[in-house]
Image: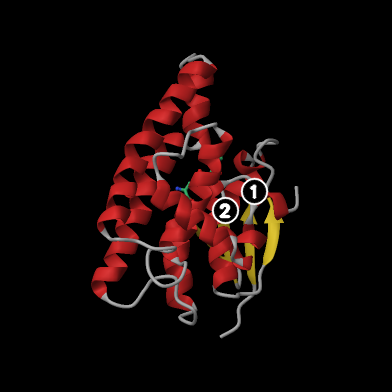
Amino acid sequence: MGALLRLHGYRRSSTSYRVRIALNLKRLDHEIVPVNLLAREQRGDAFRALNPFAGVPALEADGVVHAQSIAILEWLDERFPDRPLLPTGIEKRFAARELALAIATELHAPLNSPVLEYLKLDLGHAQAEVDIWYWHWLEKTLTGVEERLRQRDTGDFLFDAPGYFECVLVPQLHNARRFAFDLGPYPHCMRIEAACLQDPAFAAAHPDNQPA
Ligand SMILES: N[C@@H](CCC(=O)N[C@@H](CS)C(=O)NCC(=O)O)C(=O)O
């Protein structure tokens, strides 16, 4: 059942942070291989040979490389069923995926670093305009997430313990704070974040606790 797991990632990448949390929640031994996005290592030939999407994370498992953080979360649960990230039951599993995918596809995707770089460097937008773009997608998607959490009468976590959804939510809120976004209107999101940050699995995955 054991496997040699090697996570290629960057400490401030929210998608890498998702997978770090998942590996810690599932208590899977792994090695971290830092990829310096600022030095553009992800766009070099060596990294592209590993991951043709030229982004982090990439998870090597016994020599096979997996890319795309959400697919990696799903793979981890299928490959290592102990301490599952997804809850039991079709409706609960749906709820976790619904919220996680809202963040991954409607929030992270338009705010991802290559998109912001394209807006600024290729299309010539000023940083102030890029900030407006960033806040716009945060507000739109977090409003939906917050309302869904309210409808579900959520407590400290979406369900009984942190898992799939929390792996995606917490890194995105970390990024929102870096962009000085006011999270005040999203009390359910902030309550879940605060509870998660008490958990050693999340603390160990935090960007401040990673190698450079
Ligand atoms: N959809 C991919 C996105 C991967 C991605 O683009 N990650 C960012 C960091 S969060 C990255 O590597 N950016 C590289 C770049 O800016 O060139 C995933 O979920 O894994």
**In the rendering, at what x and y percent does residue 158 appear?**
38, 63
Q: Quadrant of the N terminus?
A: bottom right
Q: Secondary structure at mark 2?
A: helix
Do callouts 1 and 2 mark residues in contact (Cβ within 8 Å)? yes
Q: Is residue 184 left or right of residue 95?
A: right
Q: Eyeballing the image, is 137 above or below 133?
A: below
Q: Residues within 10 Å of mark 2 (few under 14, many from 20)?
A: many
Foreground residue, 212 or 162? Answer: 162
Q: Where does label 2 land, which residue?
A: 16
Q: Which residue is mark 1?
A: 10
Query: Is label 2 within 8 A of ligand 1 (CB to nearest ligand atom)?
Result: yes
User: Residue placed at 67% from the left, 62% from the top?
Assistant: 204
> Can you see residue 141?
yes
| Residue located farthest toward the bottom when viewing the structure as drawn | 1
Question: How many marks can you see?
Answer: 2
Does the beta carbon of the residue at mark 1 sit less than 8 Å from ligand 1?
Answer: yes
Dot 1 amino acid type: Tyr
Characterize the local packing of mark 1: few (<14), some (14-19) or many (20 or more) Cα atoms within 10 angstroms: many
Mark closer to the chain start, 1 or 2: 1
Residue name at image x 51 percent, y 38 percent: 176
Image coordinates for residue 205, horizontal then vertical, percent:
63, 59
Identify which residue, 173 or 50, lies in the foreground.
173
Kindly identify the residue that appears in the image at 39 percent across and 39 percent down: 185
